[in-house]
Amino acid sequence: MIDSEHCISRFSRYCSRFYKSPEVTDGPRFLKFLKSLAQIPGIKGSVIFPTDDETVYFLSKYHSRLSEFYRLITPKWDVVKYFYNKKLSYTLAEKTGIHIPKSIFPESIDDISNCDLRFPVIVKPAVMRPFFKATGKKVFKANNISELIKMYKLALKVISREEIIVQEIIPGASKNLFSFCPVMNNGEVIAAVTAQRLRQHPMDFGRATTYAVTKRVPELELSGTEILKAVSYNGLAEVEFIYDKRDGIYKFLEVNPRIWGWHSIAGAAGINLPYIAYKNAVGTEDIKSPVFLENKKWIRLMTDLPTSIKALLKKQVTGKEIWESYRGKKEFAVFSFSDPLPFAGEIFLIPYLISRRGI
């Protein structure tokens, strides 16, 4: 395992080796580190699973040079660019015939003043990381035209005009988020899991899912496959959608071309996606997908408990909904009786996690 920060996974009984790395944003230094690491016996030829967007960017840019030393589940930049930049993602979705939330890509204040979006709206970046690093927020919310102009000008201070997206907020977003998560081989689905993400932290514009349930949604399987197939995607991905109750349409939000925080729900649903992605990366033939099981729950205790309490106080969820989510068998993000040290490590690192990531 490789990480540049304190990482609870290093405490797992299944982690045989841990290496502290330079920051991935320092591309040349990180590249040198990975090349040196490949000289250690047993490392060369390993499969790399990225867990954040910066690493996806790095791996896609240095794909050819790294392929000499590692097996990559990350596609090359000519594919990744469509999902790293949301403006390209939305253009691709519309060309593919997939619905998106009503959006504009303003080039001036005039475009803002004359937009026909229904309020409230959000101002969001095409590329998330620089915006989030500068503001600590994923989006700016505006309830009327004057607020929108103000938020647009504020966004211009941290990102370029070409990266700004103004998008209509779909009502009930916090309970209507869905994901289609496949392993693809040259545009064809090998195995997949679909889930509804019912709670996130924070609830309105979350940085991470805290509670999810597996659910089969054929429309998402079709749309998710189509947008990945359009670029001959190969590897593991999470395709995010939001359900719009006003017109009954699932609308595309984004693609995460990497492993995601709640991926272990796949194992509970009978489909070990990371292992299938691994077998696909090493070239295993005749990979068979097991039967997909619905209504399997996944919870991250550390963030879901405070999120549930806040949502209950704001009347975003009911006590009954919270009770039902905690009843019965669940897949926990970190807690495990057979592997308890990562959970203990997470508790110990709470101050650090709050300061660096907001947990």
Image (spheres, rainbow, N blue to C red):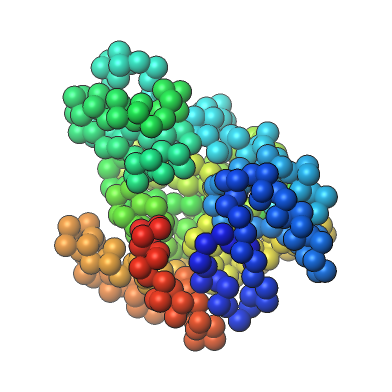
Q: Is residue 69 left or right of residue 239?
A: right
Residue 75 location (% of width, % of height): 69, 44
At horizontal 56% and vertical 26% (from top left) the residue drawn is 95
Q: Nearer the viewer, residue 223 or 110?
A: 110
Q: Nearer the viewer, residue 318 or 162?
A: 162
Q: Quadrant of residue 62?
A: top right
Residue positioned most to the bottom: 337
At horizontal 61% and vertical 81% (from top left) the residue drawn is 13
Q: Is residue 94 left or right of residue 1?
A: left
Question: Where is 348 relative to 291, above or below?
Answer: below
Q: Is residue 137 left or right of residue 146?
A: right
Residue 210 location (% of width, % of height): 39, 63
Please say whether residue 227 is visible from this viewpoint: yes
Q: Is residue 114 left or right of residue 42?
A: left
Quarter that holds the N terminus? bottom right
Please say whether residue 251 is visible from this viewpoint: no
Question: Where is 318 relative to 62, above or below?
Answer: below
